[in-house]
Amino acid sequence: PQPRLPCAAYWLGRGFEQVTMHVPGLQEQGEYYTFLAKKSRAFQCPGRVP
């Protein structure tokens, strides 16, 4: 069965991590955007917030 979204705990327990990026000029909900990315991938981006 598929979990109902949003369900971050489900994905975090399956090898994903939260990534937050600073996106200057983003207006809808502020200048920060957070999403889930697979830990096994080398996600490199200059806007990533540590």
Image: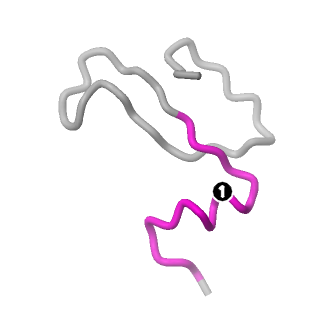
Magenta segment: 2-19
Residue tagged by mark 1? 12
Graded by Cα atoms within 10 Å as few (under 14), some (14 to 19) or many (20 or more), the crowding at tag 1 reads some
Give yes or no for residue 10 being in the magenta stretch. yes
Quadrant for residue 43, please give it.
Answer: top right
Pick the residue in front: 23 or 49: 49
On screen, residue 36 versus residue 34, left or right, reads right
Image vertical order of residue 10 relative to residue 31, above or below:
below
On screen, residue 6 versus residue 26, left or right, reads right
Image vertical order of residue 36 relative to residue 26, above or below:
below
Image vertical order of residue 22 relative to residue 37, above or below:
above
Q: Looking at the figure, which quarter contains the C terminus?
A: top right
Instruction: Residue at 36%, 29% (x, y): give it.
Output: 32
The type of colouring in the image is one colour
On screen, residue 5 versus residue 15, left or right, reads left
Q: Amino acid at mark 1?
A: Leu
Give yes or no for residue 7 being in the magenta stretch. yes
